[in-house]
Amino acid sequence: MHTFWQNATKFIAAPAIFYWASSLFGIANAGSFSVTVVDKEGKPTADAVVVLLPSGKGTARAALPLQATIAQEKMQFVPAVTVVGVGAKVRFVNNDPWDHHVRSSAAGAAQFSDTKQAGAIDLRLEGKSEGKPGKSVEVAMDKAGAQSAVLLGCYLHGSMRGHVYVSDSAWTAKTGADGVAQFDDVPEGSVQVKVWHAEQLLDLPMQQATVGAAPAKLGVQLQIVPRRRRS
């Protein structure tokens, strides 16, 4: 009998101990959350950046990358959108046989309007010689104002556009071809959702959602139809 009550007490106390430990160390239950982004016509939109700001404490399964490479190929920045964490080192490589610049500006309605922005990138990469690696340079994305979308361009080739999104939230991801950004380790509770797209010049309002034990979903519609990027 004594053994029965000892076991029962242990059984009852275990959840309480776990709850106490969870509160003490900031451990929170995590849930699955997906965000689907469509354009003005309702079509799935790739390369939209989704940023989650959970109210609960937790640790993302994987941190944002602190190393990335952006190539200049066939008069394009590849990839078109790169997502990194604050302080990331981004290497730019010119794989074209002609010279390119890498210039930066805050993305949005005032693109390249301010040529004296603090921490702006302004450099030139020589064209790639046959049989040799492309010229490259590494830039740290940790200057003032970097925690946002950065527009990339070239003085010589005005059609070249690329973007770097520097986020301080580990729950940041790009949408795929299906327009979906999937998160599997979001702390349960309320979460703020920010959606950014390179051609959506006016910021969309932040949205609220709730993450629980059951998979949660949210749909966001842009106010534009993005231009098709040439292959």
Image (cartoon, rainbow, N blue to C red):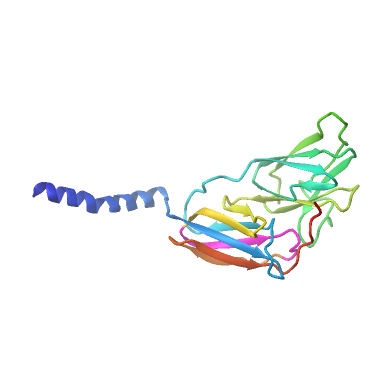
- The percent position of residue 73, horizontal first and vertical second, equals 82, 43
> Residue 92 lies in what quarter of the image?
top right
Extreme residue toward the top, this view: 131
Q: Nearer the viewer, residue 167 or 96?
A: 96
Q: Is residue 94 visible?
A: yes
Q: Which residue range is magenta in the image? A: 188-202
In this rendering, position of residue 49 left or right of residue 108? left
Residue drawn at the location 60% of the way across and 57% of the way down: 181
For residue 205, say whether it is visible: no
The structure residue drawn at horizontal position 65% and vertical position 59%, both measured from the top left corner, is 178
For image coordinates 78% across by 42% down, the residue present is 71
Query: Is-magenta flag for residue 196?
Result: yes
Say which of 64 and 22 sits in front: 64
Asked if 216 appears above or below 133 in the picture, the reply is below
- In this rendering, would 206 be left or right of 126? left
Position in image of residue 98 (x %, y %): 90, 39
Percent x, y of residue 96: 86, 40
Q: Image point 79% across, 52% down: which residue? A: 105
Q: Is residue 189 magenta?
A: yes
138 vs 120: above or below: above
Q: List x then y, in percent, for residue 145.
A: 71, 51
**Image mark count:** 0
* The one of 58 and 99 positioned closer to us in this rendering: 99
